[in-house]
Image (spheres, rainbow, N blue to C red):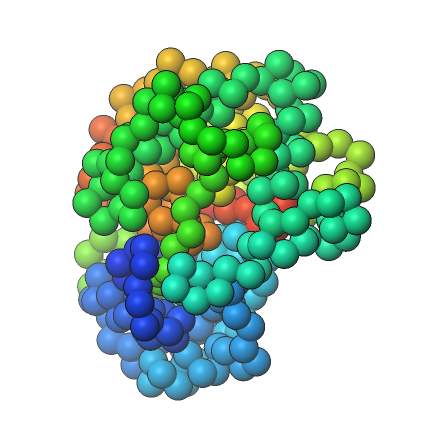
Amino acid sequence: MQERVVIAGVGHTDFGKLEGRSTISMNVEAVRKALEDAGVEKSSVDGLFVKFPTSSWEMMYGQKLAESLGIVPRIGGVWDQGGAANSSMIGYAYMAIEAGQCEVAVVCFADNPKTGSRSAYEKAWGDDDVYGWFGTPSGYAMIARRHMQEFGTKSSQLGAIAVACRRHGAANPKAQLRKPLTIEEYQASRLIVAPLKRDDCCLVSDGGAAVVLMSASKAKELGVKKPVAVLGFGQGQTSWEVAQRPVLTSTAAAVSAQTAFKMAGLKPKDIDVAQLYDCFSIVPLMTLEDYGFCKKGEGGHFVEAGRVEIGGELPINTAGGLLSETGMPGMQLVIEGVRQMRGEANLQVPGAKKCIISNQGGIMHTHSTLILGQ
């Protein structure tokens, strides 16, 4: 690394049911707010990295967005790694800035599956229809069941994650779902695909979010007031559908985190707060294992007794995550990580200096890790 790259600004729309909003309009709103947060004029933006909307595909979407923003970037494009794409794009923007390909980059995403189409979440993935699996939950249910059989993981331990995220979301005035959850209510909730219950599954949400990146020296030059350094990032991927994987209880998160920790010069013990992708409750549990916060198979025990709640040893998803703040994939976790590092989160972890963020796509096909710090 020649010089630290920082997140200079963050912004997002409301989350939930946003009638009549196009993905372009939500991206524009989020970018405008992120630039305002950074105190930067849009004329300085010369990099635009966009995750395409999951609910609809459009050719040349990045160029359409650039036109709507009124900018002409030097570099950019549209990425698809499912829910891993947002953190991955931050890594690409970081490398583009270091390589001198751009100076001020915007990374953004918006989607409207709540009021538009949610067909992308309902269809079969790959050849899953051969096995009778339709919709996103089925593959995750198979992985959760295998984890339970192999390691004795309990439903109540998945519930501990749901309870933590809902507790944090209930305290977030901007969260889509602001209703706390008890473990008794969790156990009583209906099954979606066994063993996953309703409260194991993330929200379906409209919304948009964006971050602004630049070098630390550029941030100083532009007078950015609250820059947060990107200390490390990494990716990991698998090419196999769920039914073809030789192992279901380990994921590419291990490769992704190893790369990010090495780049940052840090270890799991150095992390103060984590924002972990929680499209389904089994995902953060397995991510904690693959990231090295506990041994493989011990994730269920790790999350018990409020350990991952605010005030616990490793608070996760302090704005509510996908289970409570918004189901949009990943960028909200980055934004909450920035807030924690600035010391201005709604549920602030006292003295937090290092935050790890996970993004994950497909049915644990892709994984991306960010480490932020002061």
Residue at image location 52% in from the left, 28% down from the top: 285
Q: In which quarter of the image is residue 373?
A: top left
Residue at image location 59% in from the left, 30% down from the top: 194
Residue 39, image x and y in percent?
Answer: 20, 66
Residue 179, image x and y in percent?
Answer: 26, 35
- Tell me if residue 269 can be seen: no
Is 332 or 174 nearer to us in this picture? 174
Q: Quadrant of the C terminus?
A: top left
- Tell me if residue 140 can be seen: yes
In this picture, is 255 found above or below 36?
A: above
In this picture, is 97 found above or below 156?
A: below
Residue at image location 27% in from the left, 46% down from the top: 175
Residue at image location 63% in from the left, 20% down from the top: 148
Is 53 or 12 nearer to us in this picture? 53
In this picture, is 43 found above or below 367?
A: below
Horizontal relation, residue 372 to residue 192: left or right: left
Residue 201, image x and y in percent?
Answer: 47, 39
Residue 140, image x and y in percent?
Answer: 61, 38
Total residue callouts = 0
